[in-house]
Structure formats: structure tokens, C-alpha cells
Image: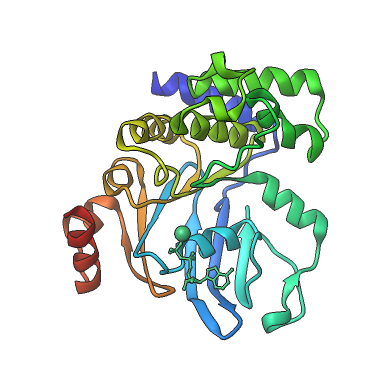
Amino acid sequence: MANDKRETVTAERNSVSPATDAPVIEIRDLHKSYGQLEVLKGVDLKAPRGNVISLIGSSGSGKSTLLRCCNLLEDSQQGEILFEGEAVHWRGTGLNRHPADKAQVLRIRTNLSMVFQQFNLWSHMTILQNVMEAPLTVMKRDPAEVEEKARHYLAKVGIADKADAWPAMLSGGQQQRAAIARALCMEPRALLFDEPTSALDPELEQEVVKVIKALAEEGRTMIIVTHDMKMAADVSDHVVFLHKGKIEEEGPPDQLFGNPQTERLRGFLSATMA
Ligand SMILES: Nc1ncnc2c1ncn2[C@@H]1O[C@H](COP(=O)(O)OP(=O)(O)O)[C@@H](O)[C@H]1O
Ligand SMILES: [Mg+2]
């Protein structure tokens, strides 16, 4: 079963571009401030191909900011961001540092699809239209081919029958699965999730967790910001604990959850698991 799935993903990926051994995304010594407030204080992060990285930490520790820096939704002032070994080109320094190459930004952003806590589906578009929108308008792909892919990914997340429904007709869990299908339809090199289950009732949460687990089993590269420690323990290859803009502790899930080394992580876990 797992092997079959891996073949499917490989076929999907190969249609995008050739493989490279460099991590899909790598962050080196990243610093990010909002005005006077330094939110990321020298963070290193690596997502090797096929790995699932979970980012955990208290509210306000900088998880969302780090994720948004990865796909250049946020500027950063210092440090490097590499996509498949290719360093982001910058112009300017400090608070005036911005990506220099628009085509590079578009390439990176379309290859690191994001799934948000609040789904962010367009309410005036059907589910199918939502899933097809970016590949059509941003990537200018062939409509018939995009529709076929969109239906394929909707089936994959278990809502093929909702293609013609409006977002408001779906449960939160179904909407989030539609948002995952939308991200997959970009055929990105990695998926970035920002608290994908936090807006959901517990019983709906599990249907989204199931989809994320299936994607992990397929060997997809993912960075997941989550408060769901059980999911993080189940799906991750590597877990990163962020505290006040710095990595306080990181390692394989068994170690981080089973044998935390720092007082801060122990405190965080006992508060979260309580
Ligand atoms: N657009 C923004 N402008 C100013 N401060 C922000 C902005 N976004 C986030 N912050 C601040 O940055 C810090 C980290 O926020 P965030 O990355 O959202 O943390 P987390 O996702 O871990 O809860 C917080 O102190 C937050 O208030
Ligand atoms: Mg956040």
C-alpha cells in the first residue's frame, strides 16, 4: 500500500521538475522583526525531501512567522533562505531587505503551498473552482488538465462528491480537506500547514489528521505548525520547539516527546498535554 502510494507521488513530482538532493527548504540564521519587535532571533530549519517537520511552541513564539518567511509571505532582515539549494536573492539590508527577483519568489511560493487554520476558501467559488483557481490563473495551466487533477485531489482527500458545492455548505473538516486539495493541485515540492486543525471541533479534527497522515505516508515533504502533539508525534521525522523566536530544542519525535531535555520543553509539554 505504502509503496503504491510512493509511486503515485513520484509520478506526480516528476511531472513538475527533476529531483535534487538539496533540502526542499532550508533556513539559516534567520532574523525577523516587526518594527522594534524581534520575532525570530537566528533560526535554522531544514526540510529534506520526503520529511515531515513539526513546529511546536507557545502562542507568540514565532511559528507562523517562520512558516510565512519560508515561502516569502514575510520579509526577513538577516539570514538565508534556500529553496532546493537555490538561495533567495535579496536587495537592501535590514528592514529594507526584500526579495530581489519576482520570478524567483513566484517559483518558490507556488512550490511551497500553504494550508491555513481558517481554510481561506473563496466563498463565491465552488469547491472545484477553488481547487482549480491558482493552477489556472497563477500557473496558466491547461484547464482540462487542471480539472482532472483537481477532481483527483478532491477524491484523494475524500470529498469528490463536493466538487460543485459552495464552501459554506461544507463542514469545517470538509473545507479544510478542500483547502488541502487546493494546495496539492499546485503540485508543490512541499506543503506548509499553519495549525490546520485548530479551528475544528475535535470530531472533525480527526478527518483532517487522517489526510495529513496519509500525505506523510506518501513521502510528501511537509512543515506543520501544530498544537496537536499526538499528530506531531505520529507523523514527524523531526520536531522543532520554538521559544520566543529561538529554537529551544529539536530532534526526533521519540526524543522530544519521550525524553525532553530542557525545562522549557518539559513545561510546555506538561501544560499542553494536561
Ligand atoms: N503582522 C504583525 N505585526 C506585528 N507583530 C506581529 C505580526 N505578526 C505577528 N506578530 C508578533 O510576532 C510574534 C510571533 O507571532 P506568530 O509568529 O504569529 O507566533 P505563533 O504563530 O507562534 O503564535 C508575536 O509577538 C506576535 O504578536
Ligand atoms: Mg501562529
In the rendered image, the quadrant that contains the N terminus is: top left
Q: Residue at x 66, y 37 (%)?
A: 122
Q: Residue at x 25, y 58 (%)?
A: 256
Q: Foreground residue, 218 or 54?
A: 54
In this view, 108 is above or below 72: above
Q: Position of residue 257 (x, y in %)?
A: 22, 55
Count of number-bearing discs: 0
Q: Position of residue 217 (x, y in %)?
A: 40, 31
Left or right, residue 150 beside residue 137? left
| Colour pattern of the rendering | rainbow
In the rendered image, the quadrant that contains the C terminus is: bottom left
Q: Foreground residue, 198 or 64?
A: 198
Q: Foreground residue, 24 or 139?
A: 139
Q: Position of residue 126 (x, y in %)?
A: 67, 25
Q: Farthest residue in the bottom direction? A: 36
Left or right, residue 127 beside residue 92? left
Q: Position of residue 67 (x, y in %)?
A: 53, 58
In this view, 256 is above or below 134: below
Whether residue 237 can be seen here: yes
Q: Foreground residue, 181 or 176?
A: 176
Q: Farthest residue in the top direction? A: 161
In this view, 232 is above or below 17: below
Q: Quadrant of residue 135?
A: top right
In this view, 160 is above or below 209: above
Left or right, residue 43 beside residue 24? left
Whether residue 218 can be seen here: no
